[in-house]
Amino acid sequence: MADERPRRRRTPRTGTVLRTTRVTPHTVRVVLGGDGLAGFAPEHADSYVKLLFPPAGAPYGAPFDVDDVQARLPREQWPVTRTYTVRAWDADAGELTVDVVLHGDQGVAGPWAAAARPGETLQLFGPGGAYTPAADAGWHLLAGDETALPAIAAALEALPAGARAEVFVEVDGPEEEQDLTAGPGVRLTWVHRGAAPGVALVAAVCGADLPAGDVHAFVHGEAGAVRELRRFLRSGLGVPPERMSVSGYWRLGRTEDRWQAEKREWNAAVEAEERGLALA
């Protein structure tokens, strides 16, 4: 029987582009503001928003009613959704910052961010999120690629004073490294990508001299690499599930839309594997 419960209606917001900055050769920082962000209040280091992009030539623009658009127009004219971590939220100024990685002319958000100009309006949903560094952890492990870098940066800023953390970030090369706020107990390792995404990151984390004791882990990025690191956390370090925030932000060879459609099944397989490890 179909689930007859009413679908929870999400409240749309709008943000107006205030300014953009090229943080690295392939990362654009976009700052949004305006009255449409009133009440925006992210609570977590990995808080995220879902940006809505109408296709070229769409007969509507922000603000718009997603349900109305989907009811009236063919699917090819529906907005495309892309998920981005909140890099920063300045409540006093009412400014939301997101970092967008560029892949040339590929994708939706990258070309938009590269061409965005002050005054443009964008529709979004959010914030969501679930992870904040545990204040009582013995140490923290933060690992990911460019897609996880905003959350890692926000997590470093949220760490308790004097907290110990091992941080691994995979990027294309030294030109893509960023200046991050890190306390004296933080060891930051930049990992330069090899032939395939995530391979160098997995090797760096698994081969590192990591501390003993209670760890709170945040591992996000390419799904295949994340799965390998989850295995390492469970079987190598013995990290319990409640001390891990682990998720594939994206999957090699998949668009975000396809990956989101597959992600539940993928996660179920990973959880089944984890149960097997627990019984071994």
Image (cartoon, rainbow, N blue to C red):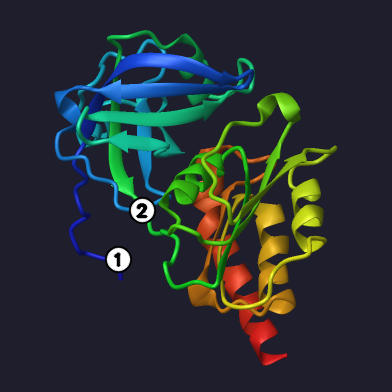
- Mark 2 or mark 1: name the one nearer the start of the chain: 1
Is 244 above or below relative to 169?
A: below
Is 124 above or below relative to 250?
A: above
Q: Quadrant of the N terminus?
A: bottom left
Residue 236 rendering spot, x and y as whole percentages: 74, 75
Other residues around mark 2 within 10 Å, as few (<14) / some (14–19) / many (≥20)? some
Residue 171 rendering spot, x and y as whole percentages: 70, 35
- Discs 2, 1 touching: Cβ within 8 Å: no
Residue at horizontal 25 percent and vertical 23 percent from the top: 33
Residue at horizontal 69 percent and vertical 76 percent from the top: 237
Where residue 30 sits, quadrant-wise, is: top left
Residue 65 visible at all: no
Is 49 above or below relative to 73?
A: below
**From mark 2 to mark 1, how far is it between C-alphas?**
34 Å
Where residue 90 sits, quadrant-wise, is: top left
Residue 44 - label: 2
User: In the current view of this chain or complex, which residue is farthest to the right?
Assistant: 195
Residue at horizontal 30 percent and vertical 12 percent from the top: 120
Q: Nearer the viewer, mark 2 or mark 1?
A: 2
Left or right: 153, with 224 as reference point: left
Residue nearest the observer in this picture, 95 or 250: 95
Q: Report which residue position mark 1 lands on.
A: 2
Q: In the rendered structure, which amino acid carries the disc numbered 2?
A: His
Residue nearest the observer in this picture, 75 or 124: 124
